[in-house]
Amino acid sequence: GVVGGFGAPSHAMPRWLGKLWLYTQWTTRWSTTFSYSLWDYTGEKTVHIFTPTLTFTPTEKYAIEARYYGTWLVLRDSKRFGSTVSLRGVAQLRSDLRMGLSYTYGLQLDQASLSDIIDMRSHLAALFVEYRVNRTWGLQPFLSLERRAIRERAIWIASIELGAYVRW
């Protein structure tokens, strides 16, 4: 698959992004996905993200995913590599309703400087829902609690988001 998008340029939002991915079903219970994302920010920051994902589906209603995000950060003349890991569980409650929990630990890419991106560690717990209103569109509420820390400094961030998507 392929995805592309544009954003309002800032330190936290990419000016444009692209994503390519490949999905492979190994057995009825095991599958893998590999994706590559390219994010281009203003201020000469470019991010390359390589994400292998392993998914186990014990039943048709439940899935468990383990992800690794290998991130190559380029800021002006500096280049560094960082890692992030994530674990996610998803339940298909009805044919039109999915709910999931996830935990992610690692880099936080919305920082202005390369040293802050590399030095900061984030713990992010999230609850998400996907509700398909009909065949062509749906809603995705998202709640999260995050702890970001650089050395001895730490902050907590709570967020509530509502996304909408279209399908064709």
Image: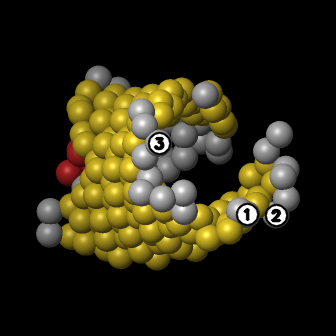
**Who comes first in sequence, dot 3 or dot 2?**
3
User: Label 3 is placed on what type of residue?
Assistant: Thr
Considering depth in this image, is 155 or 18 the residue closer to the camera?
18
Cα–Cα gap, marks 1 and 2: 7 Å
Which residue is depicted at the point 66% across and 37% down? Answer: 6
User: Label 1 is placed on what type of residue?
Assistant: Asp
Quarter in which the C terminus is drawn: top right
Residue 148 sits above or below residue 21 on the image: below
- Decide if residue 135 is in sight here: yes
For label 3, the residue is 28
Cα–Cα gap, marks 3 and 2: 28 Å
In the displayed structure image, the side of residue 112 where residue 96 appears, left or right: right
Residue 114 sits above or below residue 119 on the image: above
Classify mark 1: helix, strand or loop.
loop
Q: Residues within 10 Å of mark 1 (few under 14, many from 20)?
A: few
Image coordinates of residue 56 in percent, x first then y, are: 39, 50
